[in-house]
Amino acid sequence: MSESRLIVSNDLGEFFRTELAEARDSLRMDVPELAEFYLVNLLCDFSRQETSLEVGDEPLALIYKRALEASPAERLPLLKHIGDLSLYVAGFFSEFITRSLVSVSYYVSMGGNAYGSLCGLVGSQRQGAAFFQVYDQLARRFTEFVALLNEVSERTRENADRNSDLLRLYERWLRTGSQRAQRMLAEKGLLVREGLPDEFIQ
């Protein structure tokens, strides 16, 4: 990945596909296509929702209790919510977890069990084989997928920090016409047209 890469795509799916692929390659992980597709959609869903994280609104254990007491039709979305939320929080907010009263292992246990329970529900459904396969992978390899999302989180955070620094440098060049800033931008791979901005041309 280029150190100065800027996010220019408005397509969240394409962005997360790229980030997951690079994180997967960096960790040398084998991620089945269905699982990768599921993770991309999970990241897109949480990114688009205004209240994507409802951490603390209701303990996962209570949601799990409601799921077990619900009818099969009502149980499925509750279990999926538990699994997805656990995976997302453990993958993207491990720092938050370390400051909370619960550990990462709590999210791993809740998420893994939720996906495992989903296997039993969808396995008996018509055309449920594909869903069974992906939920089974998520249940068995939950910790690995948490590590994968940790890698995505760290990479996107580092890129955001670098891009913020790069933007400030670019703004300084526009404002002052600094040759040093222009040289630093060129070294980072940002193509700047020769000469000073128009307002600096006498």
Image: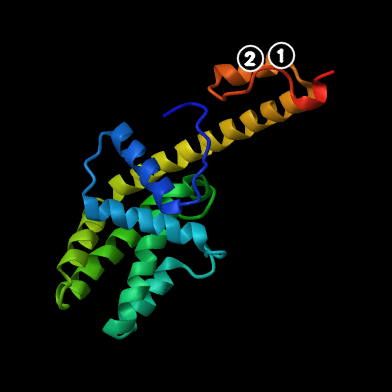
Which element carries disc 2, helix, strand or loop?
A: helix
Q: SS class of the residue under badge 1?
A: helix
Residues marked 2 and 1 touching at CB (< 8 Å): yes
Find residue 103 and name its label. none
Does 45 sit left or right of 176 as displayed?
left
The C terminus - image quarter: top right
Q: Residue at x 52, y 42 (%)?
A: 8
Count residues near mark 1 (Cα–Cα under 10 Å), then give few for <14, some for 14-19, many for 20+: few
Q: Which residue is mark 1?
A: 179
Whether residue 183 is situated above or below residue 22 in the rendered picture: above
Q: In the current view of this chain or complex, which residue is farthest to the right?
A: 202
Q: Position of residue 62 (x, y in %)?
A: 42, 73
Residue 200: percent from the left, percent from the top?
81, 21
- Which residue is labeled 2 in the image? 183
Q: Judge whether 145 appears above or below 38 on screen.
A: above
Q: Quadrant of residue 87?
A: bottom left
Residue 107 visible in the snapshot = no
Q: Amino acid at mark 2?
A: Arg
Quarter of the image where the N terminus is located = top left
